[in-house]
């Protein structure tokens, strides 16, 4: 026994060390645990999103019927109407996205319409944005019918620029076609001349959206698929680079990066714009056994397994595009843009089963492994959208 006042200095160190180890071990374990999400995600920072990343999860069986059908929704393009076009299997409709650490609420059309009462939303980009827009129209049509008012805005009758109005909620939704977000000059204005180089003016935003967006409350950017074409890059009127040119088949991500920089800078500088922007991350394609013009197909009836996801052919490209988007998104938000990221990439990279494939009108030799069947997995994008819109509203209200 030690006499009082003669206790060795090290006698307390062992219990103190054990106490600290017990205290810190859970923190160290969480710090060292790798993320299960392939693509790092960032979205609107609120107390809720700090608790749960809704974009990290997996698809689980869901026996309930879809929100709508091809018979109840009149807004589905024939190209995306897979059941109408003869797709015999329906298992792709019986899955739902489940985040790892929380629940993603079902889409509540009434709640959405109350949130956007007296407001407007624009989908800007390529046909992936239109794909999501048509899903949204089908979802809100279960509560209130959107009326096509395109004739009040343009004399052109096409699918590229359209407007709808939900009178009961004084809500306007539009799609503004801008596949590169920046000014471009295609040798074929219809965009069908895939093999000829498109001129991209990387320092000039496309006026097709930038001249119309000032008074919108929400803007959803969604694009990427057209950046795989032959491209010639211009800045200050001078050629600064190209893609798939001079006998090269390589992708040049410079144009992709600069296009997002210009688009976000333009939106930030539009005088009087007070809306909220959302960026939908890259939506993967799933051609197997060849490219789209080489007989490639997507005939799967189930999503990729984890092992198949790991060897996904276009994984490196998808990852590179995603990293650029997240980088530019973060940069734009740091400069003051009210901005949310709808990070669909990790969820959709496994959904090789959810494309129209050969179940579409027109040329049966070319499969559609880019767009998404309606109803289907793309409805999840609008569950994400509503979730983030609610969070953004809560965050904005606490700052007032």
Image: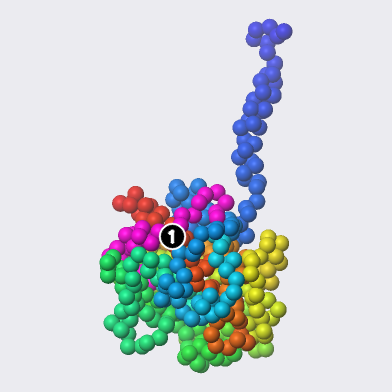
Q: Please state if 215 lies on the left or on the right of 8 as rendered.
A: left
Along the viewing direction, whichever of 376 and 83 lies nearer the viewer: 83
The quarter of the displayed image where residue 146 is located: bottom left
Q: Which of the 4 image quadrants contains residue 211?
A: bottom left
Residue 294 in magenta?
no
Tell me where residue 293 appears, x and y as whole percent.
64, 86
Depth order, front residue of 379/294: 379
What's the residue at 59%, 62% (across, down)? Answer: 346
Q: Is residue 47 visible?
A: yes
Q: Position of residue 297 (x, y in %)?
A: 65, 79
Q: Residue at x 45, y 82 (%)?
A: 183
Tell which residue pokes out farthest to the bottom in this image: 187
Where, quadrant-wise, is the N terminus in this rendering? Answer: top right
Q: Residues within 10 Å of mark 1 (few under 14, many from 20)?
A: many
Q: Could you tell me how many numbered marks the image carries?
A: 1
Query: Looking at the rendering, which quadrant does residue 216 occupy?
Result: bottom left
- Image coords of residue 298 (percent x, y): 64, 75
Observer-nearest residue: 386 or 73?
Answer: 73
- Which of the pair 215/301 is nearer the observer? 301
The residue at the point 42 percent across, 71 percent down is: 72
Residue 321 vertical placement versus 158 (above, below): above
Q: Identify residue for label 1.
A: 107
Element under disc 1: loop
- Residue 115 part of the magenta segment: yes
Which residue does the image show at 62% across and 60% down from the upper left? 38
Residue 44 in the image, given as x and y percentages of width and height: 45, 56
Span colored in magenta = 97-122
């Amino acid at each position: 026994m030690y006499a009082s006042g003669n206790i060795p200095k090290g006698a307390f160190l062992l219990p103190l060390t054990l106490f600290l180890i017990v205290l810190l071990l859970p923190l160290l374990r969480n710090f060292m645990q790798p993320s299960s999400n392939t693509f790092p995600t960032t979205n609107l920072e609120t107390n809720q999103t700090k608790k749960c990343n809704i974009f990290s999860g997996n698809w689980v069986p869901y026996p309930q019927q879809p929100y709508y059908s091809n018979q109840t929704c009149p807004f589905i393009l024939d190209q995306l109407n897979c059941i109408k076009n003869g797709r015999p299997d329906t298992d792709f409709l019986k899955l739902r996205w489940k985040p790892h650490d929380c629940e993603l609420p079902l889409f509540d059309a009434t709640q959405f319409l109350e949130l956007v009462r007296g407001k407007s939303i624009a989908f800007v980009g390529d046909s992936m944005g239109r794909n999501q827009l048509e899903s949204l129209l089908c979802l809100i049509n279960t509560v209130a019918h959107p009326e096509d008012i395109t004739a009040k805005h343009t004399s052109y009758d096409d699918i590229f620029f359209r407007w709808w109005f939900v009178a009961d909620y004084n809500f306007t939704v539009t799609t503004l076609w801008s596949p590169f977000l920046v000014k471009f000059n295609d040798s074929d204005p219809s965009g069908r001349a895939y093999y000829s180089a498109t001129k991209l003016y990387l320092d000039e935003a496309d006026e097709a959206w930038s001249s119309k967006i000032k008074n919108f409350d929400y803007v959803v950017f969604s694009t990427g698929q057209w950046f795989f074409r032959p491209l010639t890059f211009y800045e200050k009127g001078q050629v600064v680079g190209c893609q798939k040119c001079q006998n090269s088949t390589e992708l040049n991500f410079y144009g992709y990066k600069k296009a997002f920089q210009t688009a976000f800078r333009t939106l930030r500088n539009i005088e009087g714009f007070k809306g909220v922007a959302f960026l939908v991350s890259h939506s993967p394609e799933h051609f197997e056994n060849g490219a789209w013009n080489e007989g490639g197909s997507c005939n799967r009836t189930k999503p990729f397994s984890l092992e198949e996801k790991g060897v996904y052919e276009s994984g490196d490209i998808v990852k590179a595009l995603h990293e650029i988007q997240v980088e530019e998104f973060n940069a734009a938000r740091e400069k003051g843009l009210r901005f949310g990221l709808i990070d669909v990439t990790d969820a959709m990279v496994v959904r090789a089963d959810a494309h129209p494939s050969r179940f579409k009108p027109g040329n049966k030799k070319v499969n559609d492994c880019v767009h998404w069947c309606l109803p289907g997995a793309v409805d999840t994008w609008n569950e994400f959208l509503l979730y983030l819109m609610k969070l953004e509203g809560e965050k904005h209200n606490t700052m007032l």
